[in-house]
Image: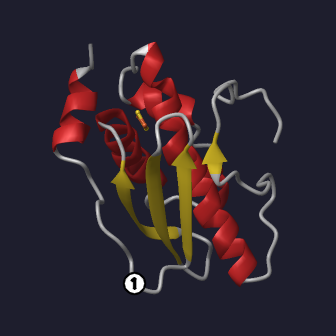
Amino acid sequence: MYSEKVMDHFQNPRNVGEIENASGVGTVGNAKCGDIMRMYLDIDDNGIIRDVKFKTFGCGAAVATSSMATELVKGKSIQEALQVTNKAVMEALDGLPPVKVHCSLLAEEAIHAALWDYAQKNSIKIEGLSKPKSDIHEGEEDESEEY
Ligand code: FES
């Protein structure tokens, strides 16, 4: 069963759409289910995430987790945004059924991919950010796994 917060974010997702001339755009796919997520970040000169939008061909859990993730990174610094893990997002949503945990990885990876794109465009290095995967494969839910 889904929590009320998951249902709320699924039915009224926040920050859906795209940002023209975004500072960074990240797209990731989930090989397990074929779902796709794209995240747009607008980052100001001080490295603060002014705006964030997402689009997805994804399931309800992917929509809800992305919606919550965008709320959590909006107005934050890049370093703070990196702390927004899928676990943090799931906690903020009062949990997800175990079979849906992999869906929450799309949001986290898409944010990382968008930050990576931003870093590439500006020739900077973001401390603690390694090259994101473009696909989330089965068995990679374990967040202790290095990539
Ligand atoms: Fe694909 Fe949820 S089933 S992201």
Q: Quadrant of residue 126?
A: bottom right
x, y percentage for residue 146? Answer: 83, 36
Q: Quadrant of residue 55?
A: bottom left
x, y percentage for residue 141? Answer: 64, 27
Q: Which residue is mark 1?
A: 20
The answer to whether residue 86 shows anywhere in this view is yes
x, y percentage for residue 83? Answer: 63, 43
**Relative to residue 35, is residue 145 depicted above or below?**
above
Q: Quadrant of ligand 1?
A: top left
Residue at horizontal 54%, vertical 61%? 27
Q: Amino acid at mark 1?
A: Glu
Residue at horizontal 47%, vertical 36%? 33
Please state if 34 lies on the left or on the right of 1 as rendered.
Answer: right
Between 145 and 15, the one lying in front of the other is 145
**Relative to residue 123, is residue 41 depicted above or below?**
above
Residue at horizontal 56%, vertical 45%? 108
Please state if 88 lies on the left or on the right of 6 as rendered.
Answer: right
